Image (spheres, rainbow, N blue to C red):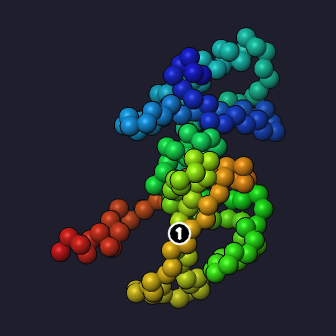
Amino acid sequence: MTGLGYQTVEVERFAGGLLRITIDLPWKPGAPEQFVQVEDCEKVTRQLQFVLEVEGTEYSRLEVSSPGIDRPLRSEDDFLRFVGEQIDITLKAPMGTAAGSLVAPNRKKFRGVLETTDNPKTWQITWRDEPVSKPGMRSAKVKKDLPLQALQFTLSELRDACLAPIVNFKGRRPAENRSNES
């Protein structure tokens, strides 16, 4: 797919003959972000159908898509590309106990803002744990100042990482931005 100008993100084969290919446009630091369009998926689908037929690859259905809002992060370039974005990570092993840590020692899943560190092989996410609200209860209008927490990790410690799928269906800016405009 590099010949067509696309990067392969993921190739999945499912029962029933489904072959799913996820593509993206190559990232260039400093260049404006480009996104995969429907036309790009159509172009790759037509090319892949031809190649798969010539190669004699068995499949009943071919799907070509963009990575979506919950894009998987696998390579160092993926992490560099999305510094400053909110991501979800799952560790291979629980983080254990750390002195003064507010995090449960058996916790493996985290959501936070991706940051770089001084060590080029180490990454960090930062987050504030929101209080757990019970079903049927109104959320508190004023939230206490929750401590900022951080977790450093290497890519080898991760089982899974992806962009956090955060969608605002209300079409409004967050309240903290509206209050600053007055």
Mark 1, residue position:
127
Given the current orientation, which residue lies at the most extreme front position? 118
Position above or below: 26 against 153: above
Neighbours of disc 1 within 10 Å: few (<14), some (14-19), many (20+): some
Given the current orientation, which residue lies at the most extreme left position? 182
Residue 11 vs residue 99, the one in the foreground: 99
Position above or below: 74 against 95: above
Residue 107 vs residue 18, the one in the foreground: 107
Q: How many marks?
A: 1
Which quadrant of the figure has residue 8? top right
Residue 29 relative to residue 49: left or right: left
Residue 132 % position (x, y)? 58, 82
Position above or below: 109 against 100: above
Residue 168 % position (x, y)? 42, 62
Residue 13 % position (x, y)? 76, 35
Residue 45 vs residue 160, the one in the foreground: 160
Is residue 38 in view from this perspective? no
* Tag 1: amino acid: Trp
Q: Residue at x 67, y 65 (%)?
A: 109
Position above or below: 21 against 141: above
Residue 58 % position (x, y)? 80, 23
